[in-house]
Image (cartoon, rainbow, N blue to C red):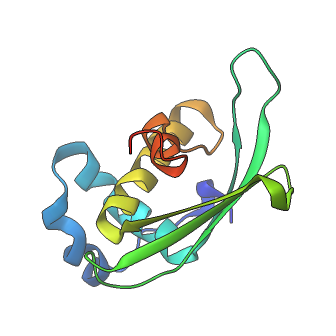
Amino acid sequence: MSLEKLQPANPRDVNVYAPYYQGRKRSALPLAISLYQTGNLEGTRKIEGGDSISFVASWSVSSLPADLTRCRLQFDGNAELSYEVTLANFEFVDFLIEVLFYFKSNRSPDFSQAFYRKLLRLDD
């Protein structure tokens, strides 16, 4: 699904997550929950000094913010370039909000540097 065609999620679904976010992030929450509910995202990771690499992200979907989401990213259609991370739903939705902000300014879906650090376990 194209992020441009994303419709806001049902307010009932959004309100469950609202206490976890403030300001600008809270206003992006209806679209982020809608994206979360799709269970997948295709995008492109820009590589500094190199070619961009495509990825497909897929994740489990649950309705409760404290439940865990397992997200799997596969780069360049290569099974050897697959990575997984497990996060609380509210934390993962926060990363999806950042995807939406990045898409708005760059017209290309991608996760934040902080998400990749967590995915690659660089901060452990």
Kindly give the residue lying farthest to the front in the view shown.
Answer: 124
Residue in the image at 52% along x and 51% along y: 119
Q: Position of residue 115 (x, y in %)?
A: 47, 46
Look at the picture and state if 44 lies above or below 22.
above
Residue in the image at 35% along x and 65% along y: 30
Residue in the image at 83% along x and 62% along y: 79
Q: Quadrant of the C terminus?
A: top left
Q: Is residue 85 left or right of residue 31?
A: right
Q: Is residue 52 left or right of residue 39?
A: right
Nearest to the observer: residue 70 or residue 124: 124
Nearest to the observer: residue 11 or residue 42: 42
Kindly give the residue lying farthest to the top in the view shown.
Answer: 49
Q: Position of residue 120 (x, y in %)?
A: 55, 46
Nearest to the observer: residue 74 or residue 15: 74
Q: Quadrant of residue 88?
A: bottom left
Q: Is residue 76 left or right of residue 94?
A: right
Q: Quadrant of residue 44?
A: top right
Q: Position of residue 20 (x, y in %)?
A: 17, 61
Residue in the image at 80% along x and 20% along y: 50
Q: Quadrant of the N terminus?
A: bottom right
Q: Is residue 100 left or right of residue 90?
A: right
Give the total number of marks visible in the rendering: 0
